[in-house]
Image (cartoon, rainbow, N blue to C red):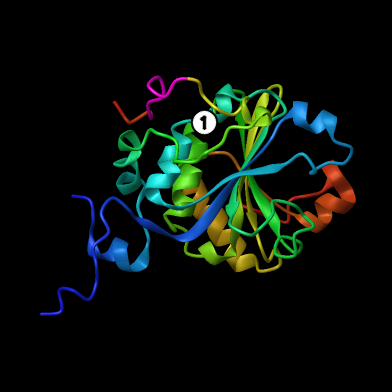
Amino acid sequence: LVGDESAVTDKKYSRDFLLKFAEHWTDLPEGFEISSDMEALMTSSVSSHVIERDSH
Amino acid sequence: SSATSKPVVHQSHPLENSWTFWFDTPTAKSKQASWGSSMRPIYTFSTVEEFWSIYNNIHHPGKLVVGADFYCFKHKIEPKWEDPICANGGKWTANYQRGKSDTSWLYTLLAMIGEQFDHGDEICGAVVNVRGRAEKISIWTKNASNEAAQVSIGKQWKEFLDYNETMGFIFHDDARKLDRNAKNKYVV
């Protein structure tokens, strides 16, 4: 269940709601440019980057 | 039927505000004469999907180099005291040991972009400062003298983070004049 009506009208999203999207959006936006001074910020591997969820 | 009046946009959940990520590193800082001049906007996003597209490809605080500052501020608000919207503001700060702030940083971002604060209009943005032994997350607000709004933000933020320590609010004006001697004006 992704779109509930209150979220559409108020644009308020709970943490749990937002976390549902985490693993589906792993590619950088089109046209995103990585300049040399941003190298320290970017991860080299997308696949190694998984959001920690409550597992216990 | 009025089914045609509102087109459904798939896979896009607009945020109430647009937000800009900013990044500053020690390497960049050393090349520049004055503080703040090496700080640069990375990307401005306005949907849930765009947020994750960036977040999933950048280091979290624990993996950033010591000295790095990473910001998420509302679009068109610069994360500087000099910004007219920030000038009369202040900040709440949560302190963590090095490598321990990743989850809180994410929860801070999600609470902001998901508009979970009752006084969300008061918020300018958030920053994580990565230092030798510590990681510090701050939320910057607009009108430091509006105590009720600041205290509400501080209390809610503590709940979102499940933060058990005392949290303090410092006026930018005091920080500017007194630097490290600036005292907390509010605590929660």
Q: Nearer the viewer, residue A12 or A38?
A: A38
Label 1's element? loop
Q: Residue at x 43, y 57 (%)?
A: B116
Tag 1: residue type?
Answer: Ile
Q: Would you say B165 lies left or right of B66 here?
A: left
Q: Is residue A29 magenta?
A: no
Residue A23: horizontal and vertical position, in percent? 32, 33
Highlighted range, magenta: A45-51
Chain of the residue on which disc 1 is drawn: B
Taking depth in this image into account, of B161 and A53 the one nearest to the observer is: A53
The residue that label 1 is drawn on is B58
Instruction: Locate the N terminus of chain B by quadrant.
Output: bottom left
User: Which residue: 49% across, 61% down?
Assistant: B17
In screen coordinates, is B148 left or right of A18?
Answer: right
Give the image location of residue A17, x and y in percent: 30, 48
Residue B79 horizontal side relative to residue B116, left or right:
right
Residue B88 position (above or below residue A53): below
**Between B3 and B75, which is closer to the camera in this rendering?**
B3
